[in-house]
Amino acid sequence: MVAAAPSVKRRTSPALAAVLVLIALAIIWELVKLVFRLDSRTLPHLWDILAALGEPSRRNGPPLIAVLLEAAVFTAQGAVVGFAIGAVIGFVLGTVFAHVPILERSLVPYVVASQTVPILAIAPMVVIWLQGSWWSVPVIAAYLTFFPVTINTLRGMKSPDPRAIELMRSYAASTWETLWKLRFPAALPAIFTALKISATSSVVGAIIAELPVGVQRGLGGAILNFNQYYITGPQRLWAAIAVAALVGIVFFAVVSLVERAALRNIVR
Amino acid sequence: MTPVVSLTNVNKIFSGGGRPQTVALKDINLCVEPREFISLIGPSGCGKSTLLRVIGDLVTVSSGEVLVNGKSAHEARIKREYGMVFQSPVLFEWRTVLHNVELPLEIMGVPKAERTRRAREMLKLVELHGFERHYPWQLSGGMQQRVAIARALAFSPKLLLMDEPFGALDELTRERMNAELLRIWQETQTTVIFVTHSIPEAVFLSTRVVVMSARPGRITEIVPIDLPYPRNVETRESPRFFELVTHVREALRRGEEMGA
Amino acid sequence: MTTQARVARLGPPLVIFLLVVVLWEVLIRALNVPRFILPAPTAIGSAFVNTYGAVLDSATYTLRNALLGFALGCGAGILVAIATSRWTTVREGLLPIAIAVNSIPIIAFAPLTNNWFGSNNPLSKVAIVVLITFFPTMINTVRGLTLVEPAKLELMRSYAVSEFTVLAKVRIPNALPYTFNAFKVCSSLSLIGAIVAEYFGGPRKSLGVYILQEAQLFRFDNAWAAIVIASLLGIAFYLVVITIERRVIPWHASIES
């Protein structure tokens, strides 16, 4: 009706634009190094970081990239296991809260308040509880995951149009049917928003969990380790951090892809 | 006297994006005199909203000439010679009712005291005094649309462009708003161009009803409305009213058959 | 809100709070839970009374870093968002990258800032907080500046106003709720960032180092006292943000509640 024809201006595709910005950032990186005369200890050349990946991290050892990838897999395992546990707990809690108002009213303020608490401050305690076992990594990752998932599941489950709920009632649908046919699909976008936040924080949680006990096999351990040799080889710390960054991005991207597949039929 | 709006051989073609071209407006000729109340009526997709936006220079024409108060539509927009009311109220939720009405005055650099006085006056005109400090969400749909009308009138434009402003209201509220708009039109002596879907609304309000048809959007008939003033509830029940409603309805149907 | 409504809203959580604290105390005494698992509330309380000087000094140091980083990171995020909102290509290129960077565990950069500025230099922590708060603020603000109802822009066009006026009168007010949502997220992120950055090394009088050290020395009561203080700071920071939000965008708060 209204002549609001979608603007059909010539536009750059987002992928191309992202590549262009990435190239621009790389140029800025090297320019900053050049203009401010930063030595390689402060800011190594990008190519030095790339080259470091191919060299052995210690004499006669495997190349750095192999060491880091192994560490990344170790950390990612902890993050993914914790993410899965946290997501399931969060989903169940959110669903229960959405159906039991008294529980919602008495417990949700705590869930909200706990999001304002610097949760990672407890990380050293968790590590002590579990006596430095591998499980401290997924436990902390799960802890970080379940809060956003709980809240968003609750919000999403309560989001359907009241008329849609009336419609289900008119069919005499059971609570269970209303849950699966209406509330759950309606909650999916909100749940995925939470999962994307949690994907990142579970990686953060996994890395942090490795710090206090110095779990050597993970990325947290690698970062601590290469940090000690920063003076002689700063590019190795940079490489370790880059791999940690990559783990975060990949995890986020995977969740985003699953989201796209799951929500492709839901008009937003 | 220069016409308020004069359209000569106006065409508008939407194209691009790999989609087939659509002729939104074809050979539109229309002349609107001062103090007229013109309704544009037609089926969905007949380009009546586009025509309104062409007059307001919110959409540029593909060919033809659009004059508003003797100037080009663009110049008229830059000089802020018309007020616009949309289908939805388009109020700024962060502003109170009073500040929403003040918005155009603020933009035009009217001093604070003057614009408050002016906005209060307008709110009185639309019978919303006492709601100055409310936020839009605290008002009903009809009240919100009255705020939008007050905002459009606040800077006393000579021309008021209205795009289905009462489309979302229930029938009774709509009739009340019609009567009120007619009163405001007479009090403020503006010229109104009014897009609508409703035949009774168009007949009740207008001095002339412009009937349009779709694909391509064009004017098929212009129906002069000779209902006497003041128009009120009785007007809606008079035989002449029904005759005119029937006339417009048949004109619409003829337009549809021509297009098919 | 009437007193009755307030009781109805605050009653259940308060009851639960008291129940949890009492149950916690009772269970720990009854079951003789070792202190390394969880000290009783009274033990944490007395630990705080005995060590409050050190705890509060550490908390002040960490809070100062968090606040400074929050101000700089959020401020920069808003400025960049406003600056890029004009150029579609820059924005569309920058946004996916900002979202990608936002999914990076930024904490991992803490050793780097420690090397740059020195681990005892507050700047090393502030820099991490700036990085952590910048991206959510920028992403949300860009969304708020661009997700404007098209009819509002059409209205402004009918007034023939400059792009700057549209920014000031439409885009920025429209973005405020989005930006405040980012502030809420960033209030806790900034404290987390400041504390966790200290895990990678920092001065003795900082919450992160304090918690880590006391835990490693088996002084769990002290560590928990510091954790409770950190939590209170987080809640207080959040409350301050929502109080300011109510003040600045009253139209929004009233829609929500």
Image (spheres, coloured by chain):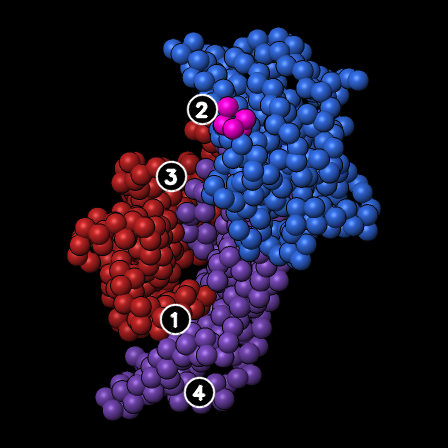
Q: Please report the bounds of the magenta region as a residue range.
A: B239-243
Q: Chain of mark 2?
A: B
Q: Residue at x 47, y 34 (%)?
A: A47
Residue C175, horizontal then vertical, whole percent: 57, 47
Determine if marks 3 and 4 fall on one subunit. no
Amino acid type indicated by mark 3:
Arg
Element type at mark 4: helix
* Residue carrying label 3: A268
* Residue carrying label 2: B44
* Residue carrying label 4: C45
Amino acid type indicated by mark 1:
Tyr
Residue B228 seen by the camera:
yes
Q: Is residue A1 magenta?
A: no
Q: Is residue B65 above or below residue B237?
A: above
Which of pointers 2 and 4 indicates the residue nearer the eye?
A: 2
Which of pointers 1 and 4 indicates the residue nearer the eye?
A: 1
Amino acid type indicated by mark 2:
Ser
